[in-house]
Amino acid sequence: MAIQWYPGHMAKARREVSEALKQVDIIYEIVDARIPESSRNPLLDEIGQGKKRLIILNKADLADPAATRAWIDYYAAHQLPAIAIDAQHTKGINQIAQATRAELAEYVAKQKDRGVRQVLLRAMCIGIPNVGKSTILNRLAQRNIAQAGNTPGVTRAQQWIKTNADIMLLDTPGILWPKFEDPLVGTKLALTGAIKDTLFHPDDVALFALKQLSHQAQDELTKFYHVTPAELQLAGPDLLMQMTAHLGFRDDYERTSWAIINDVRKGRLGRFTWDEVPADGQ
Ligand code: G4P
């Protein structure tokens, strides 16, 4: 469950993550593949300056595959290496070590020139709550290390876990806060489960989702909510009303909204990406 962020939490997280970063050669910036930009914290650009970085688009199983490819190309065009994985089902995890070695090849070569026989590469996972940091850690460690819970920063004493012969990972992920400023970003974070469910109104989030779903998930809306083709043409609030009626929820629109949000979160209505790659490709 996502925590609620106060200025004190943010200051603590910033301090702890900055401190932990001093110990690593590369940052694994974990983002949600469904909202690759909305789930990033811009602070990392500041405190991670000078560090190599690998963007890991996790939960790729829930995102639109074409959009995921487009995002990876977009980041590559901005000199940010990115890979897509599905940590829950242990898919694509091996790419992490490969990409780490590729990114740190120069560093390894320098160390070898200096006579270091076995160069160890040190990494840590950083991201906003619920993007899958703990799941990734556990997959890389091949055992249960981190409790799937959220407290700001890096909180407890850290240890190094050996994930490969040459890659060491901090056993505690760095937790940063989500972006709050842009309401649309907030809606996307709510839809994907990155902010506390008590912090938003479900109708707003469901109506946002319906805009895209009524074009891209017509069959699923018909199947799960008994929507007719004519109803799919209705404006969002009217469509939500009809869905509520079909489900027999009387005028409990909130209940329908939660059903939509939960179905989206679980991927029952298909694979969607809610952040668009900027059109100019910049
Ligand atoms: P965090 O440390 O970044 O906070 O995230 P954590 O690993 O706890 O993962 C959050 C939720 O996301 C977990 O679900 C986890 O199973 C799920 N998850 C992680 N990686 C993936 C992935 O690649 N694909 C999918 N589909 N799910 C993934 P949960 O325990 O059920 O929590 P919740 O969904 O009820 O919040």
Image (spheres, grey):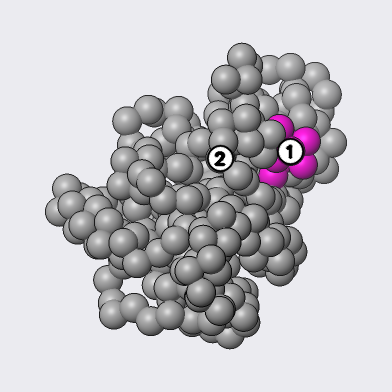
User: Which residue shows up at 37% across the image and 28% down it?
Assistant: 182
The residue that label 2 is drawn on is 80
Question: In the rendered view, would you say 255 is above or below 109?
Answer: above
Say whether residue 184 is magenta. Answer: no
Q: Position of residue 163 (x, y in %)?
A: 58, 78
Front: mark 2 or 1: 2
The residue that label 1 is drawn on is 69
Q: Name the amino acid type tagged 2.
A: Leu
Q: Position of residue 122 (x, y in %)?
A: 47, 69
Q: Give the mark nearest the N terminus, 2 or 1.
A: 1
Q: Does 231 sit left or right of 43 as displayed? A: right
Q: Start and end of the magenta stretch? A: 63-70
Residue 109 versus residue 141: which sits nearer the camera? Answer: 109
Q: Name the amino acid type tagged 1.
A: Arg
Residue 155 versus residue 119: which sits nearer the camera? Answer: 119
User: Residue lying furthest left in this view?
Assistant: 8
Q: Position of residue 281 (x, y in %)?
A: 63, 20
